[in-house]
Image (cartoon, helix red, strand yellow):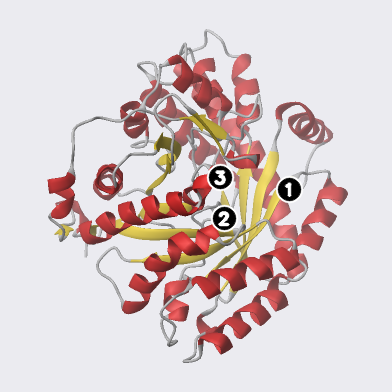
Amino acid sequence: MLFTPFEIKETVDMFLRYKLDIRAITLGVSLLDCACASGEETRRRIREKIFRLAGSLVKIGREIEVEYGIPIINKRVSVTPIALVAGSSEDLDYTPYAQTLDDTARQLGVDFVGGFSALVQKGFSTGDRRLIASIPQALACTERVCASVNVASTKSGVNMDAVRLMGETIKAAAEKTAGRDGIGCAKLVVFCNAPEDNPFMAGAFHGTGEGESCLNVGVSGPGVVKAALEGCRGASFDELAEVIKKTAFKITRMGQLVGMEAAKRLDVPFGILDLSLAPTPAAGDSVARILEEMGLEAAGAHGSTAALAMLTDMIKKGGVMAGAHVGGFSGAFIPVSEDEGMIAAVRSGSIGLDKLEAMTSVCSVGLDMIALPGDTSAATISAIIADEMAIGMVNNKTTAVRVIPVPGKKAGDWAEFGGLLGGAPVLPLSSAKSDAFIARGGRIPAPIHSFRN
């Protein structure tokens, strides 16, 4: 891959002035061959395999940072959904598996490990139920483990029994970490149409359709896109679209270079490049500010969904041209606590949960890192999940819910999670109840357009 001197200078400016970075390099590891009847032996095999394949991940990531001058913010590992691996054992509680993953990640210097997960869009296995029951304690007693549960898909519909169970699980996870503003929930995602090759936490896992191991890369550069649009004030949407597309192309080329080099040094296949614009709490690294640069007074103003739709689509169109294998989410994230512009919009009252939900119909993921009042019921959380799952199911896209009912706090209070997770104002919710709706259980059938065989 060749670069001109102008492109090199331009890329350096992106790093130094506009916070461009590789958000994550994530090594996916299959643990299917670790499963056996003994839980202790299974965990020993898990530890040994991750050490063998990911032992040099952090070292290689740092070497590439130094050699290329490209910041790599997180080095991560994703594994086969633990419900599938632990299901062969006699264990009733899967918390020890989370502790094994956490301890292994800590020894390797890995920032996060994803895959304490279950796939229950159509029903539960015994292992799925045991894993979900273990999530609250597992997230409370670990620092680096992330959990996810896929409860819906376009092909299968929405498993409303799982939706109800996840509302209860989120409440329990918040209560287990009440002293830290319910931070356990910040490491837990509920999915519709979960991708098997996602490098972003907290939803990353190594899907069963993946190989033995691969290296996935997540690139992010909201500040770069905003800076590019600053030179287009007053321009038409046709011109804005072209600028976003060209900028995404440049960002993706950098990610492709890093991903292929890291995979080569790890001696594993290069998996996918995720093109998502993932913001941080730092000023100048915000998706909300991009929307404002398009002409909105604040994120959440009328027109925000249209602006986000164009941004997401142009990111994908530009990135696909620059990367051989694109996957994961790819588009634009709109987490509240991780985006300083989104936080400002919530504080000013320009955006609320209803508008955020509408915007998820066109963004990369869904309702992300949203602080809720601590007295929010499990049924209400389940109903929020159900709405978001329906959007993903009907639109044949990935959607997700990562909400935090903050114990002891009410609407307007501040919740602090720290680091890249940031902090957020607690959002108000509708007072109308959804208990009878959630209590029905069963499965919402797949939409008619899912039948494509």
Where is mark 1, residue-wise?
Answer: 72
Alpha carbon of mark 1 to alpha carbon of mark 2: how far?
A: 13 Å
Q: Nearer the viewer, residue 109 or 16?
A: 109
- The quarter of the image holding the C terminus is bottom left
Alpha carbon of mark 3 to alpha carbon of mark 1: how far?
A: 27 Å
The x, y position of residue 3, in whole percent, is: 78, 42
Element assignment for label 3: helix
- Please count the marks in the image: 3
> Is residue 136 visible to us here?
yes
The crowd level at tag 3 (other Cα within 10 Å; few <14, some 14-19, many 20+) is some
Element assignment for label 1: strand
Q: Mark 3 near mark 1, Cβ–Cβ under 8 Å?
A: no
Q: Nearer the viewer, residue 183 or 358?
A: 183
Disc number at residue 180? 3
> Which residue is depicted at the point 66% across and 37% down?
250
Where is mark 2, residue-wise?
Answer: 199
What residue type is disc 1 on?
A: Ile
What residue type is disc 3 on?
A: Arg
Q: Quadrant of residue 287?
A: top right
Q: Is residue 63 above or below residue 295?
A: below
Is 363 placed left or right of 221 in the picture?
left
The x, y position of residue 102, in whole percent, is: 62, 66
The x, y position of residue 292, in whole percent, is: 51, 17
Is 174 placed left or right of 256 in the picture?
left
Q: Is residue 46 above or below residue 258?
A: below
> Is residue 153 visible to us here?
no
Q: Earlier in the sequence, mark 1 or mark 2?
A: 1
The x, y position of residue 45, in whole percent, is: 61, 84
